[in-house]
Amino acid sequence: MTTLAIDCGGGGIKASVLDEAGTMRAHPIRVPTPYPLPTSLFVQTLVDLAGQLPKAEKATVGMPGMLRHGVVVSTPHYVTKSGPRTRVLPELVEQWSGFDAQTILADAFGIPTRVLNDAEVHGAGVIAGAGLELVMTLGTGLGFALFDGSRLAPHMEMSQAPVRWGLSYDTYIGEHERRRLGDALWSRRVGRMVDGLRPVFLWDRLYIGGGNSRHITPTVLAKLGDDIVIVPNSAALIGGARVWQLLID
């Protein structure tokens, strides 16, 4: 069984086809995320990507925001005029709220499809399936997923929780702040975030991934602890195949 895996981010959308072991059967392809992004353009962009890859038997799509059973509750970037940190368009908020992405994409692809939060798909590619495992992805903002054994917990938008100075985690450790502060100061923020969340979750293991995980400085990495693993961004696609093995309520 092969899986079309699509990872939808705030800045780019990438896709590949993988076998059941998570081995890529096609070189990943990537396009910039188009803005403004009505739901019809989102679907067409993904269908166009799929058309450039070998035919797969099922599909997994990871995208930012709060999703329940494949239905979008809210998505932070896709409702904006020009991408993250730009003006929110009310007509896009209306379009995306309650958008049944899973059903519509399954019809568009013509194969069984799962649509989950992107951090949840990322996590499926790295978890061991034992104990309480938390996954955080660092990119445009903060992605978050929690697993108990091989069971995925209901999604929580930790990215929207307040931190300090009126900032949410999404803003506090997002790409904009990394560029503004530089890697050293930004990495210290990541360390403070981990220290603050550890007593809240008491995880057995925390995985940190996403494109910006590579920018965490060696000094901060050395202080994070043995219960923390930095994982490659390729997990976002590998998880597309493995997510079908998870227990999802």
Image (tube, rainbow, N blue to C red):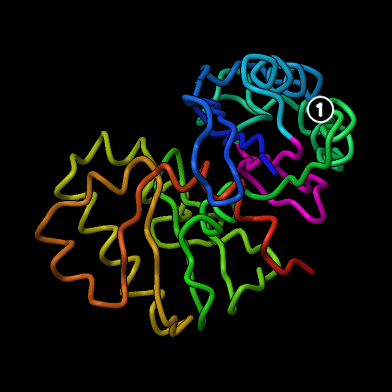
Residue 67 magenta-drawn?
yes
Q: Note whether 105 is above or below 45 in the view shown.
A: below
Q: Residue at x 26, y 34 (%)?
A: 179
Question: Badge 1: how crowded within 10 Å, few (<14), some, or many (20+)?
Answer: many
| Residue drawn at x 18%, y 62% as measured from the top left | 221
| Label 1 residue SS | helix
Relative to 44, residue 58 above or below? below
Query: Looking at the picture, how far across and down is residue 118, in whole percent?
Result: 58, 46
Tell me: 173 left or right of 81.
left
* Whether residue 128 is situated above or below residue 241 in the rendered picture: below
Residue 219, quarter of picture? bottom left
Q: Quadrant of the N terminus?
A: top right
Quadrant of the drawing holding the C terminus: bottom right
Q: Which residue is more in the foreground, 27 or 89?
A: 27
Q: Which residue is mark 1?
A: 109
What number of labels is visible?
Answer: 1
> Residue at the left extreme?
219
User: Of residues 125 and 91, which is closer to you in this image?
Assistant: 125
The residue range painted magenta reads 57-76
In reply to whether residue 172 is colored magenta, the answer given is no
Residue 238: where, in percent of width, then height? 51, 46
> Residue 16 appears in which quarter of the rendering?
top right
Q: Quadrant of residue 115?
A: top right
State left or right for residue 101 relative to residue 8.
Answer: right
Q: Callout 1, which amino acid?
A: Phe
Q: Is residue 165 above or below residue 111?
A: below
Q: Position of residue 37 (x, y in %)?
A: 69, 20
Residue drawn where x is 47% and y is 24% of the image? 27
Q: Position of residue 39 (x, y in %)?
A: 79, 25
Relative horizontal placement of residue 14, taking residue 195 as reference (left or right): right
